[in-house]
Amino acid sequence: MTRNTHVTIEDLEALSMGSVFLATGGGGDPYLPMILAKQALLEYGPVALIAPSDLNSNDYVVALGAVGAPTVSLELLPSIDEAGDTLRAFEEHTNKKVDAIASFEIGGGNSLLPLVAAAGAGVPMIDGDGMGRALPEAQMMTYAIAGAKPTPAVARDYAGNTAAFSTSDTQTYERHIRSFAMAAGGMITAAEHPMSGEFIKTAIISHTVSFAITLGKVLMQHRGHVQQMIPHLNACFKSSVYGQCKLLFEGKVTDKSVAIVGGYDVGELTVASFNSEPPVTINIKNEYLIAKQGDKILASVPDLIVLVDIETCEPINAERIKYGQRVAIIAVECPEFYKSEQALAAVSPRAFGFDFDYVALSAK
């Protein structure tokens, strides 16, 4: 196994900022996970960040992250031991040593928890993730779409209780893991979708961790009004696995209605224009799914919908959105993986119950 580069303490703020942008409102608040990651790196040193192409074919890889409603992450706070203890419980359950850790999603807190586990275990973290953004359900991960089985899997709650899972398919696993999260207060840590190095090379969205760090540095370096930031963002995304980046709308949050339903944050918010334009409504299921202005669909899942502070361009998680905030809505075209027929069956608007097909941002 070749180890390419490392994630250091100096990278954490940029990783946090960039991954919140890519998380499309979900992935969990990154503040406390960033503090935990900093402590882990202080104690254990930098974590090797390995390109998927440099994995050995027989390396044993597991995906790790938090499962639950992001709103709960503001109250049910993780400890520094949870990610590492979940990894150890998984190794004990499977009687296998994990060679590398992958992220569920490049999203907020879920970009940092695998880093904490990797630091404690002394194993590398893979430069990539299973979504290229954040999405609410396990069967929406690239790992599952590509054919990885979700189990054996192990989950751990805040009190140290663990549960092991063995299911026939990922949709069944999603129901079971979500039920455990709800019973455990709304948020758990899970190690799931064990894969070989050979398999994950075909299933992962590559280089999203290093890109999130690069994106975060751009956001921090050029911090300012969204209109000034768009050229910098376009230049950044041009060399990425993503498509075009487009400013859709600017306005003020005038309504937000979100509740925890079935273990997810579900609802919508409204952004009113500063002029006479009709308002934009955004549907939420943990993440921002649909941006709609009247009958016009401005952007939809699997493309990324991002809300940022209009004056600083700092991305805002869905659970942090408040009435009266002045925001801009940005859309980014998703990686090519999610445009395939197989992927769209799991992540298109129809997969979320909306009665229309996905149209790529570049085709609008």
Image (tube, helix red, strand yellow):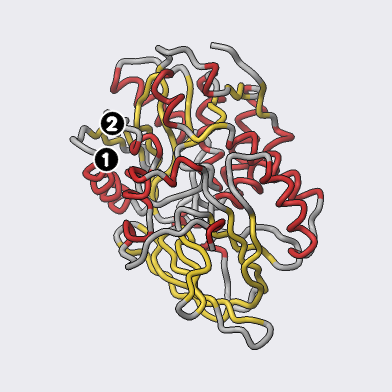
Which quadrant of the figure contains the C terminus? bottom right
User: Which structural element holds mark 1?
Assistant: helix
Q: Which amino acid does label 1 sit on?
A: Thr
Residue 113's disc number: none
347 relative position to 296: left or right:
left
- Point out the tag, 2 or 1, that comes first from the N-terminus: 2
- Where is residue 103? Give x, y as percent: 48, 35
Residue at 58 percent of width and 37 percent of height = 208
Would you identify the image quadrant in which residue 90 lies?
top left
Q: Which picture quadrant has residue 152?
A: top left
| Rendered image: mark on residue 170 | 1
Is disc 1 surrounded by few (<14), some (14 to 19) or many (20+) residues within 10 Å?
many
Which residue is drawn at the image coordinates 58% and 22% (left, top)? Answer: 50
The label on residue 149 is: 2
Where disc 2 sits, the SS reads: loop
Mark 2 vs mark 1, CA separation in Å: 7 Å
Please state the horizontal and vertical placement of residue 157, each as a whole percent of the image: 36, 42
Q: Name the outermost residue toward the front.
A: 363
Please tell me how crowded label 2 is: few (under 14), some (14-19), or many (20+) other residues with Cα within 10 Å: many
**Residue 35 versus residue 285 in the image, above or below:** above
Left or right side of 363 for 192: left
* Camera-nearest residue between 74 and 258: 258
Q: Which residue is drawn at 79% across and 56% down?
A: 223
User: Residue 251: horizontal and vertical position, in percent?
Assistant: 65, 76
In this view, the residue in front, 81 or 248, is 248
**Mark 2 touching mark 1, by CB under 8 A?**
yes
